[in-house]
Image: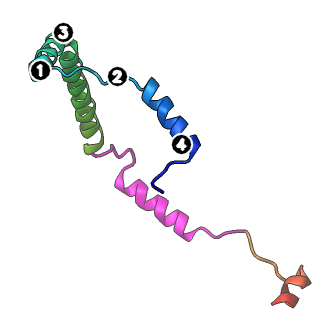
Amino acid sequence: MDQLPPDDQRLSAFLRRYRPSPPSSQGNLEEYLFARIEKDVQTHPKNLFLLFSSAIIAGVIMGWGVYRYSSPPEIIATKPELENFVLESWNEETTEVADFNSSPSWTNEW
């Protein structure tokens, strides 16, 4: 494995010949980055406006939701009306009666 096959040597020569040159190094890269960050912060104050306005809108919506769902609902009916409704619906007889005799297959299956 010391020697590369002929195909690999041609590939290596091709890559050496057409390899891109590395980017030049910048000595003042740190200063450049800080200047760029400062410039971006100064040119984009509307991001801060969008952040604050979004926070205000979210707070208003949350406040409305808390107000809306924390108050108890209004009771329309009075207590005697509710008692009568419960008693009538509890004592009401149903007219539907299960008739298993009309279908002999049901009784045979059981």
Mark carried by residue 43: 3
Q: Rate crowding at label 3 as few (under 14), some (14 to 19) or many (20 or more) other CA atoms within 10 Å.
A: few
Q: Earlier in the sequence, mark 2 or mark 4?
A: 4
Q: Rate crowding at label 4 as few (under 14), some (14 to 19) or many (20 or more) other CA atoms within 10 Å.
A: few
Residue indicated by mark 4? 8
Of the residues tagged 1 and 2, which is closer to the observer? Answer: 2
Residue in view at x 53 percent, y 36 percent: 11
Which region of the structure is painted magenta? 71-95
Residue indicated by mark 1? 27
Q: Earlier in the sequence, mark 4 or mark 1?
A: 4
Q: CA distance from mark 1 to mark 2?
A: 18 Å
Label 3 close to label 4 by CB (< 8 Å): no
Query: Quarter holding the C terminus?
Result: bottom right
Residue indicated by mark 2? 21
Q: Earlier in the sequence, mark 2 or mark 3?
A: 2
Considering only vertical position in the picture, is 73 above or below 35?
A: below
Q: CA distance from mark 3 to mark 4?
A: 52 Å
